[in-house]
Image: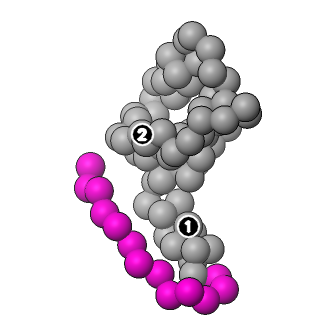
Amino acid sequence: MIEFSVKLSNRPGQLATLSRELAGAGVIITAVLHDKPGALADMAEALATIGVNIEAMYLLRSNGDGLHFAVAVDDPESAVDHV
């Protein structure tokens, strides 16, 4: 895993362009899990069952909607319906 910071120009479309590039590289921008015991295990097991490896995960925020994570996986196309 490689962690990096990005500085973008303050212009319309810059974040959209970066997001598309990250998605193409296997980063799923957000996964929202309910704040309850076993929610993370359920997601990890669902991905493991279909053969998708979680390469990195970052907690972005926690609010009333749940826990919001950025998740990097080795097969984003397969993973998208399971996070």
- The x and y percentages for residue 77 are 58, 48
- The x and y percentages for residue 19 are 56, 67
Residue position for label 2 = 57
Give the numbered dot on residue 43: none
Determine whether label 2 and label 1 are within 8 Å by CB: no
Closer to the camera in the image, 43 or 11:
11
User: Does the stretch in magenta take in 52?
Assistant: no
On the picture, is 55 further left or further right than 17?
left
Alpha-carbon neighbours of circle 2 within 10 Å: few (<14), some, or many (≥20)? some
Residue at the image point whose x is 59% and y is 46% from the top: 30
Alpha-carbon neighbours of circle 1 within 10 Å: few (<14), some, or many (≥20)? some
* Amino acid type of the residue that numbered disc 1 sits on in the rendered structure: Ser
Residue at the image point whose x is 57% and y is 69% from the top: 20
On the picture, is 17 further left or further right than 71?
right
Label 1: state its secondary structure: helix
Residue farthest right in this picture = 65
Q: Which residues are magenta?
A: 1-13
The answer to which quarter of the image holds residue 67 is top right
On the picture, is 57 further left or further right than 35?
left
| Label 2 to label 1: alpha-carbon separation | 16 Å
Q: Is residue 38 above or below residue 24?
A: above
Give the numbered dot on residue 19: 1
The answer to which quarter of the image holds residue 16 is bottom right
Query: On the rendered image, what quadrant is the C terminus found in?
Result: top right
Q: Earlier in the sequence, mark 2 or mark 1?
A: 1
Closer to the camera in the image, 30 or 74:
30
